[in-house]
Amino acid sequence: MTATVTAPTAVAEPSSRVRPNEIWRIVRLHTVNPSIFFLVPALVLGGAWVITMVIALILLGAGVPMESTGFEYSWAVLSPQWYLIVVGVQAVSYTFPFALGFGATRRDYWIGTGVMFALASLLYAVVIATLLVVERATGGWGIGAGMFEALWYVGADWAIAFYTTFALQLLVLFIGAGVTTVFMRWRMRGMLTLAAGGVVVILAIIAAFTFSESWDELGRWLASIGLVGVFTLLLVKALAWAVAGFLVIRRATPR
Amino acid sequence: MTSIVASTRGLTKRYGAFTAIDGIDFDLEEGRIYGLLGRNGAGKTTVMQLLTGQIFPDGGTLEVFGRPPAEHADVLRRLCFIAESQRYPEDFTPAHVFAAAPWFFERWDAAFAERLVADFRLPVKRRIKKLSRGQLSAVGVIVGLASRAPLTFFDEPYLGLDAVARHLFYDRLLEDYAEHPRTILLSTHLIDEVANLLEHVILIDQGRILLDRDAEDVRGSATSVAGPRAVVERFVAERPVIGRDDIGGLASVTVDGRLDRDERIRAAELGLELAPVSLQQLIIHLTGAETAGTPEKEVAA
């Protein structure tokens, strides 16, 4: 090269390991288009509520007694979950490559995304737990409809509804994002390995419980830890996905 | 005095059995406009992805602002790279992109970005996946210019842009570069379009560097000699020939290196026509000859 060239410019200041601004800007990046985390889940939940109301009116019109409507078997309260697993996938497949182009590190991206997931789960948990209480207080929105008083929410208080929703929500988001980090790092080969590995693990667990005839024991144990215990297991699983996703995304490469 | 902002030695990237980047060495100096030129699939985008830490090298060393770029926040915040096939978050509009930009680029100039949006007539409320190829290129160009990152990458910025927009990019880049000097690496296979913009040319082909030279030197570095074939052949006999076209009894031969005054006079006396070779023609000669000999590598690409 030319004679005027000197040594490479050194980086002025090595930045600290904790970079709140770098992490918070990832949260802001996720919310700059509010439809993804807020508008669409609200629409899905609202849509499910409207459908539930219509069904309740039909049942009311047909004279079906309130105690035999079967609303407690409705999955309407879980309707946003299907969309939110896609949000988890897209957070890594679309937003991650974009953030890298904007100069974010993988580490800051994953931590920021985890913060976003936690805040979103917190919000949804508050909303669903509160709507459950409202539904109960209004006698099923005045017409005996039961959208939130369903599944494990039947009889649950605000705190339990909040905690179980939060744990499930975090798990759903982190599974979507975590699985996608595997694709981002190892592409199709990684996905097939993950799927095959998952099947093998599940079959091994089934075999272990079947041969040792301990299904009843498992049932008793789950019953003994109760609703809160079971959802604590889900929360632990969510955190495991968060840690695994962090390890995988550190060497992930966008296309 | 200039300093080096990025430097590679023996940099290698493999995808399975295919070697995309085959042990390349180059330096990028502060405050220059570099052209990263080469054919489709030559490895231009791969070089940019390596320099921005988006992908990891398989061999050699790579330093950007004195460090390997991947996962170094203090390096990455000085870079801006919008890839030609950049992915954007689901349902993003250009307005979302420009709203987020100042959080990532500390020198972001929102007023400049706004002016560029008007210049390029970019519909900022339209979803990115509904934009035309040219409008998509404009998003990358606007982010690249308004970010004023110390090391800015433009990956095929001309793709799909109309003549007016290409001219706008050219003008705005030079104006802003004069006021806010920085290092720019621009990749393209549309060489004539950017030839006048470039201060330095790095030509890659099949993952190797064919040329790494000052653009001014490159422009005068080859001459084409045209005339009756026998006369041309005699005139160029002693010179390295890098290209040849024959039409009937006439020949046009491109020779490497400059002709001195005596040679020019002799050529005129022989009735030969001398013409400078454009950057694009020179590169066609350099990369066309190279690839013709190794067709099996092209298949692997």
Image (spheres, grey):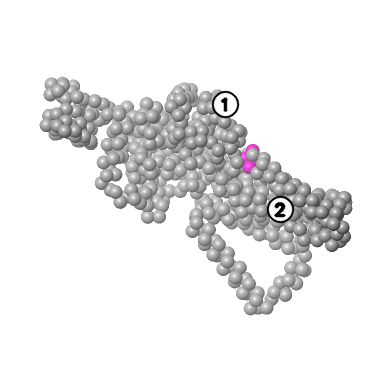
Please give the range of residues in magenta: A28-32
Q: Amino acid at mark 2?
A: Ser
Q: Is residue A215 above or below residue A249?
A: below
The residue sitting at 80% across, 58% down in the picture is A71
Res B292 quadrant in image: top left
Q: Is residue B178 left or right of residue A104?
A: left
Q: Is residue B149 above or below residue A107?
A: above
Does the stretch in magenta take in B60? Answer: no
Residue under label 2 = A79
Q: Is residue A20 left or right of residue B280?
A: right
Residue B235 % position (x, y): 14, 30
Instruction: Point out which mark residue A165 bears.
Output: none
> SS for tag 1?
helix
Residue under label 1 = B114
Question: Can residue B8 be seen from the camera position used here?
Answer: no
The residue sitting at 35% across, 51% down in the picture is B300
Q: Does the residue at mark 2 contact the one at mark 1 (Cβ under 8 Å)?
A: no
Residue at far front of view: A62
**Badge 1: how crowded within 10 Å, few (<14), some, or many (20+)?**
some
Q: Amino acid at mark 1?
A: Glu
